[in-house]
Image (spheres, rainbow, N blue to C red):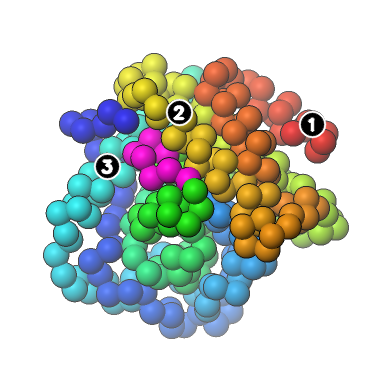
Amino acid sequence: MRWEGGKKSENLEDRRNMAPATVAAGGIGVVLIMLVAAFMGIDPKQAQKFIGNAGGNGQNRGGGQVQRELTAEEVKSGEFFRTVLNYTEEVWDEQFRKAGEKYLKPKMVLFSEQVSTGCGNAPSAVGPFYCPADKTVYLDPTFFEELKLKMGGSDAEFSQAYVVAHEIGHHVQNLLGYSSIVDEVRQTKSKTEANHASVRLELQADYLAGVWAHYGQQKFKFVESGDIAAAMKSANAIGDDRLQKNSRGFTSPESYTHGTSEQRIKWFRLGLQTGDLGALKELFSLPYNEL
Ligand SMILES: [Zn+2]
């Protein structure tokens, strides 16, 4: 991926050199908003096990004490994520403007081990996620080492950019109202219907990541040879079927919340090829067995 020298976003905060987040005090009465759209195959109910006391308001940073200097490698990866975040801002800003809307830029936080968020405290184990309450993407970049070593994905730069674009896709869904449609299904319908709605949302986020790559490539020419294959390799590694098979040795499609590897690749590719945002609603309404 070509990114060095590109403009950097001002909306990224690097907390990797700060004291790990502690449980926020004073969370009584604050409703824990459990919409953790984790990138890995963890559904919100499972994620709840990881996430401690809510009351995080996005401001608590476990004291926010700087404990050490960032390493040279961290400085470099920080620049990379700032540049990718800027690429998403420029693309979505333009797409929203074309539609007569205004794009509200999300924030992004890099952390290590544990982080305090508007959705509660979360450990790295939940994988990258978007918190709608504070409109922020949270990412521990060591996730990509795991993705490569344990899950058979790729840690190539463009594969990392795809993961960021997927999470930003959840932000776009939040702005466009798709997240609240799915929330309603989760609250009022059966478990199976809720899982289907989750799959729909995840595949749409993959589609939006593809749409981002479509327009980003036109504007910035950042895709190099092998990049798309690297992103596909990661999409393939983190489908629910693959994740479940790796962890349990068998799969149960009715419990899928992210879509199969094949579906994830299909939707990313479709977005990449067409860049068609006009089709978003129609695609979202497809019968489940046609996704
Ligand atoms: Zn997701």
Rendered view: 247 above or below 96: below
Q: Which residue is mark 3?
A: 80
Identify whether 262 is placed above or below 249: above
Vertical placement of residue 214 versus 76, above or below: above
- Amino acid residing under circle 1: Glu
Q: Is residue 91 magenta?
A: no
Residue 39 numbered mark, or none: none
Question: Contact (CB < 8 A) between labels 1 and 3?
Answer: no
Marks 2 and 3 sit apart, C-alpha to C-alpha, by 18 Å
Give the quadrant of residue 66: bottom left
Q: Secondary structure at mark 1?
A: helix
Q: Which residue was labeled with disc 2? A: 228
> Would residue 2 be seen by someone viewing this image from the given angle?
yes
Residue flagged by tag 2: what amino acid is it? Answer: Ile
Q: What crowding class fits label 2: few (fewer than 14 Cα within 10 Å), some (14-19), or many (20 or more)?
A: many
- Where residue 75 sits in the image (x, y, percent)? 19, 52
Extreme-front residue of the structure = 249
Q: Secondary structure at mark 2?
A: helix
First in residue order: circle 2 vs circle 3? 3
User: Is residue 111 or residue 174 the one in the foreground?
Assistant: 111
Residue type at numbered disc 3:
Phe
The residue that disc 1 covers is 290
**Magenta residues?**
153-159
- Quarter of image, res 59: bottom left
Q: Earlier in the sequence, mark 2 or mark 1?
A: 2
Distance Cα–Cα, label 2 vs label 1: 24 Å
Q: Nearer the viewer, mark 2 or mark 1?
A: 2
